[in-house]
Each structure stands twice: as structure tokens, then as C-alpha cells.
Image: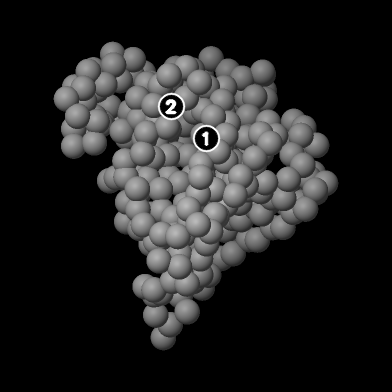
Amino acid sequence: MSRIVESFPRKITTLDPVFIAMSDGVRLAATIWLPEDAEADRVPAILELIPYRRRDGTVFRDMKMHPYVAGHGFACVRVDIRGSGDSEGVLADEYTEREQRDAEDIIAWLAAQSWCTGAVGMTGISWGGFNALQVAARRPPALKAVIALCCSDDRYADDVHYFGGNLLTEDGMWSSFMLGMNALPPDPQIVGARWRDMWRERLEAISCWSEIWLRHQRRDAYWKFGSVAEDFSAIDIPVYAISGWDDTYFNAVPRLMQGLKGPRKGLIGPWSHAYPFLGAPGPAIHYLRV
């Protein structure tokens, strides 16, 4: 049996927390894994921007994946979306203009760091795959490639909200899940004494997002925004699209392969909604092993 890799070609260091200022002054919380010698031997950066709380929600997955990639010569940057985890501000909806602008700000910040070559990639599963494609379509200069997993190019026709114009039960489940996530406080050990004010701001702004989604029962401008299928030609960087046959988003992979004209690659495995190294049912792609 293969074993999990615990030593890497380059020793790594972990920076946490790192606060990155956005163009409007709001600071987003990040964890960064990078080679110890990155100041002397600069590396590209890889951004994962999601709202699932980097220090408790995804910490066990992150601690397997990001150190491995960093140990092979990258800076892996896991950022809490505005209003989630330890980041300031309020999270008002999924895939907003503000979210995409924040991603552009983060990418520019990463490219300017002394340990970065100036090249940045984005990766992510589900929400992180959606916004990787969305940001690629905005063409920030430093963004060079994306790996988008288990996500969709079409927010209306192929997500958790509507199918064939019919409302899905998943819509209400997803709205309830995010309602609970958005009600969680930041960590006082990370943000300090202002944690209570940050939490109160979130609670006062909290809403059930189905209230928004039910106001848009047809394919209108709301759904077209962030659906890269509306204009595949906007994406001109390499894209690796990955999903599983047991995941509801596998349809996006062949569409992206057909619609994109730049360098592209698709992979559909036997797993469900998961990173391939965590994929079940198997066989998984164990890229964290020897």
C-alpha cells in the first residue's frame, strides 16, 4: 500500500493569520503555506477563496493538500471569503461582484509579494471552482491558470437552484446551510477583541438566500452574471476542469472542453463531490502519495 508523503522536496513554513486589505479597506483572513526559501527562490502562488472557514471548516483537508503542494514549489493561499471565517465584512450572497473584485485584489497582492514570481493560479472545489472560472473570465493580469473542480459554467441551468425551470429541493437545503455558516462568529484568538462587533455585524445582516433566488425564477441577468457559459471566449488562460460521475456537476466538464478555445483539459472520475484524492467511491487519484 502507498503511504502518505510527509517530507517534501522543499521545507515549508506556515503563515497564519495573514490579513489582506481589499480596495475598500476590508481585510480578509488567509493562511499561507510556502517553501522556507521562497524569498531566495521565488514561487508561483495558488489561491483558494471559499467561505467554509479555513481554521475549522476545512482545516483537516487543507492540512493534507496545501502543505503537499507548497512543498513542491508553490505558495498555497487559503482565504476566507469576505464575511466568513475570520474575514471582515458581510457575505450577502454567492458569486457576487464584490467577491470577484476581492479575488482580483488578492491576486494582485500575491503577485506583488517578495516571495512570489508574479504568477498566480486559482483552484477550488464547488464554490471555489465557480469563482475560479468567474475570475478567469475577468482576466486579471497575474492569473495564469485555474483548476476548477465539481462546479458549473451555468448558474441557472446546472446548479442547486433550478433545473429545466423547476425549483430544486437542494435550493432550500443550500440556503439553510449557508444561513447557519454565516451565523458563526470569527475566532477571538485570531481577530482579537473586535470579534463580538464583527459577529454582530454578520448577525444583523444575515438573511435566507432563498429569498433572493426565488425572486429570479427565470434565466435573467442575475443568473447570467457569473455563468461563464454566457461567453466562453472571455477565458483565455489554461483551464483544468475536474468532476466525478457521481457528482451533479459532471455536465460542465464536456461543455467547458467544447466551449473554451484556449489550453484545456477535462477529467471525470468515479467519485462524487470531492477532491480526487478524497474521492469516493474509488478508485481515487492519490496525488498525496509516493
**Residue 10 in sight from this viewpoint:** yes
Image x and y of residue 122, in percent: 57, 45
Image x and y of residue 126, in percent: 51, 44
Mark 2, Cα crowd under 10 Å, few <14 / some 14-19 / many 20+, is some
Residue extending furthest bottom? 1
Q: Residue 179: name its quadrant.
A: top left
In percent of the image, x 24 and y 31: which residue is there? 191
Amino acid identity at mark 1: Trp
* Helix, strand or loop status at disc 2: strand
Amino acid identity at mark 2: Ala
In percent of the image, x 65 and y 40: which residue is there? 142
Image x and y of residue 59, in percent: 32, 51
In percent of the image, x 51 and y 70: which residue is there? 287
Q: Are marks 2 and 1 in contact (CB under 8 Å)?
A: yes
Q: How many marks?
A: 2
| Disc 2: which residue | 21
In percent of the image, x 27 and y 27: which residue is there? 183
**Residue 248 in sight from this viewpoint:** no
Residue 222 vertical placement versus 240 (above, below):
above
Query: Looking at this view, is 59 or 110 the one in front?
Result: 110
Q: Quadrant of the N terminus?
A: bottom left
Query: Looking at this view, is 224 or 248 the one in front?
Result: 224
The numbered mark at residue 177 is: none
| Disc 1: which residue | 109
* Helix, strand or loop status at disc 1: helix
Residue 54 vertical placement versus 174 (above, below):
below
Q: Separation of disc 2 and disc 1 at Cα?
A: 9 Å
